[in-house]
Image: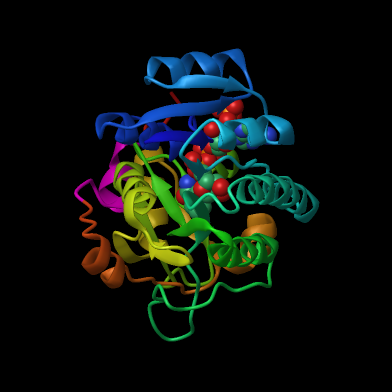
Amino acid sequence: MHVFVTGGTGTIGSAVVPELVGHGHTVLALARSDASARTLEAAGAEVLRGSLADLDVLRTGAARTEGVISLAAGNDFSSAEAVARLVAEETAAVTVLGEALVGSDRPLVTVSGTPWISGRASVEADPLPTDGPVGGRARTVDALMALGSRGVRVSAVRLPRTVHDQGQGGFAGLLTGMARQSGISGYPGDGSQRWPAVHALDAAALFRLALESAPAGTAWHAVDDEGDAVRDIASVIGRRLGLPVGSRPTEEFGPFGPIFAMDQPSSSTYTREVLGWRPTHPHLLEDLELLEPTEA
Ligand SMILES: NC(=O)c1ccc[n+]([C@@H]2O[C@H](COP(=O)([O-])OP(=O)(O)OC[C@H]3O[C@@H](n4cnc5c(N)ncnc54)[C@H](OP(=O)(O)O)[C@@H]3O)[C@@H](O)[C@H]2O)c1
């Protein structure tokens, strides 16, 4: 299949592009800079120059291909306003991509997060929480899912809090960045709350499987680790960086503080059974052992 990919240079996208190429697909990839264009060409993709805000370029990408994987999103989480801006930009972009595919029966694979359900691991049938700092994103995904009845084979890969590669990425990556800045590897509360995780290479395999075979309107969980205690994550980060480890006030974790503080394990049993997805790459706590005291 000829596939339009946005975000192909990110933690996840840089695993998705080779996964597609390695399984006989061809890739047209959005690039907003010369550096990104070079990276994508080196990975075997054809480049379409433009950014998420260039809605006509997105329409062109969707029109020139047989399916879309939408991964691009900003990563300025410094304030509630910054998060709202990036959610708005991503919403406008995926809405255009979805509308461009109406009536085509082509696949559109989009991203959301695994939901949190009090007292148990969330499953694929659980609804996305539509409140909180990234609630707008969930509402966007819900609206996209409705395109399943308008001739778009739309599906969502729900990502856990950390998608990692070489010890970097996701919420654990945010904790690492904060630890480097503050000199303490901190966690909110008592650190017993659990976050799910997956290696980017395993997540990439699930994006490919969803592209190839997920029915319209379905959601899948890219979860390998059902839940690592945040205290354990912070402990590995602290040891690797040579920093003390301890609880910090939730407010110190910025707009995501309340989410950081929540217990939110998630299961992928249904995804594994139905799509035959089998994660094989290192778990988060093993991958964090690759962190170095000074940034590469
Ligand atoms: N990593 C995780 O743990 C995790 C967990 C849950 C959900 N997610 C979601 O999964 C998606 C991919 O995550 P990721 O970790 O791979 O992200 P990432 O490493 O931050 O990469 C973001 C990608 O989006 C591109 N991008 C950002 N803003 C853009 C714009 N305005 N125009 C065009 N391209 C733009 C970047 O391109 P450049 O190379 O040009 O910067 C890059 O390819 C995001 O929606 C993210 O929120 C990630």
Quarter of the picture holding the C terminus: top left
Is residue 174 visible from the viewing direction of this image? Answer: no
From the viewer's side, name the closer residue of 206 and 147: 147
Residue 282: say if magenta.
Answer: yes
Left or right: 24, with 8 as reference point? left
* x then y, percent, for residue 10: 49, 34
- Residue 122 occupies quadrant: bottom left
In the image, is residue 66 above or below residue 194?
Answer: above
Color encoding of the figure: rainbow
Residue 281: say if magenta.
Answer: yes
Residue, far bottom? 119
Residues shaded magenta: 280-291
Quarter of the picture holding the N terminus: top left
In the image, is residue 123 above or below residue 289?
Answer: below
Left or right: 55, with 7 as reference point? right
- Residue at the image position 29 percent from the left and 72 percent from the top: 270
* x then y, percent, for residue 32: 64, 23
Q: How many marks are shown on the rendered structure?
A: 0
In the image, is residue 106 above or below residue 145?
Answer: above
* x then y, percent, for residue 57: 67, 29
Q: Quadrant of ligand 1?
A: top right
Residue, far front? 103
Is residue 245 visible from the viewing direction of this image? Answer: yes
From the viewer's side, name the closer residue of 110 and 160: 110
- Residue 277 occupies quadrant: bottom left
Left or right: 257, with 120 as reference point? right
- Residue at the image position 44 percent from the left and 66 percent from the top: 218
From the viewer's side, name the closer residue of 121 and 60: 60
* x then y, percent, for residue 238: 41, 47
- Residue at the image position 68 percent from the left and 46 percent from the top: 96
